[in-house]
Image (spheres, helix red, strand yellow):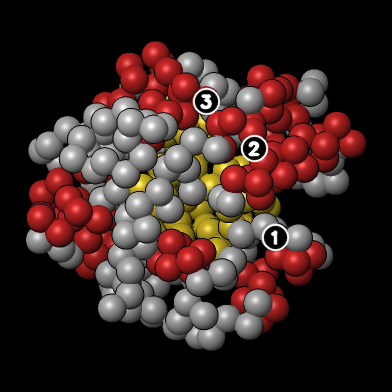
Amino acid sequence: MPRINRAIELLAAGQPVYSDTVVELTHGSGVRQAGTWADCLIVDLEHQPFDTTRLGDFMRGLVAGGPTDTGHRTPAVIVTLPTDGSDARTVRTNRWMVQQALATGVHGLILCHAEAPAAVKAFVEGARYSFQDLGVGSHLEAGRRGSGGQHTAAEIWGLPVADYLECADVWPLNPSGELMLGLKIENRRALVQAEASVAVPGIAFAEWGPGDMGMSYGYREAHDPPYPPDMLAAREQVKAACDRSGIAFLDIMQRDNVVALIDAGVKIGATTREVAALGRRHSRRKAGTAS
């Protein structure tokens, strides 16, 4: 049986993951996106209204339009939260966003402006149930995700509630977990703490957020390459931190750099269907499999 989370399945098999951005949160959009070319879908709620009713409609649409070509009930869906990781207090105050997003049945979350390791730790704890004890005591406190939302999420995943509760934990800390937590190390304050932040157990990937990173260096619009030398140095610092911690690095992949980025160890590519096809051929991915 395949994993619930296609992105985790691929990363565990050593294959790059390709993501697309969701632009419309409706049931009909979910039905259409069930057949996406992408391995995972990113829902940007950082800059759009945090509307979990619409997010839930979209997730139910994915189920109605599924299964995917690879046999998964839905594509993996990762939500960018509108709160930030400036400090642990901010994350804990906004933990309701984590709970409500996960209750819709999504498969992962991204914490923006992850500036402090303590904030990242609070993020991981907020996404975990208190009975999940891997890493607790040595690096983490007990999880803070409350009971109540698991019934809706389990229905989206197509699991009995008891099974959902067991596998709704963070990977790779829990090898059987199906949730992916990511960070945006996207400003100069976050960059100083990048090494410690990405090393927090329970984090699966990180990105360098070129748009905001560029602004923190004084560039008004530097989201896309070519990047100036100081931004390139920031990118390399985040990627090196990810490599040392053994987590995936996310970057923008384009036609002219996809092969080089894969060869350099970039594991998650925000890209297009055409570029993803090039990457899959380069990594010799077999159609419909994780290998």
Q: Residues within 10 Å of mark 3 (few under 14, many from 20)?
A: many
Question: Which residue is at 39% across, 79% downward?
Answer: 70
Horizontal placement of 283 versus 153: left or right?
right
Q: Is residue 269 left or right of residue 88?
A: right
Q: Is residue 273 above or below residue 217?
A: below
Q: Which residue: 52% across, 31% down? A: 112
Q: Quadrant of the N terminus?
A: bottom left
**Given this view, does label 2 or label 3 mark the residue nearer the observer?**
3
Q: Nearer the viewer, residue 137 or 256?
A: 137
Q: Is residue 60 visible?
A: no
Q: Position of residue 182 (x, y in %)?
A: 49, 42
The label shown at residue 27 is none
Q: Secondary structure at mark 3?
A: helix
Q: Amino acid at mark 3?
A: Pro
Say which label, 2 or 3, has the lower sequence index. Answer: 3
**Label 1 amino acid?**
Gly
Query: Mark 1 touching mark 3, by CB under 8 A?
Result: no
In three-dimensional space, the C-alpha distance between marks 2 and 3, rounded to whole angstroms, equals 17 Å
Depth order, front residue of 14/93? 14
Name the residue carrying label 2.
209
> Looking at numbered disc 2 in the image, what kind of residue is underneath it?
Gly
Number of the label disc, if any, that sits on residue 265: 1
Q: Which residue is mark 3?
A: 117
Residue at position x 43%, y 62% from top? 8
Q: Is residue 44 above or below residue 280?
A: above
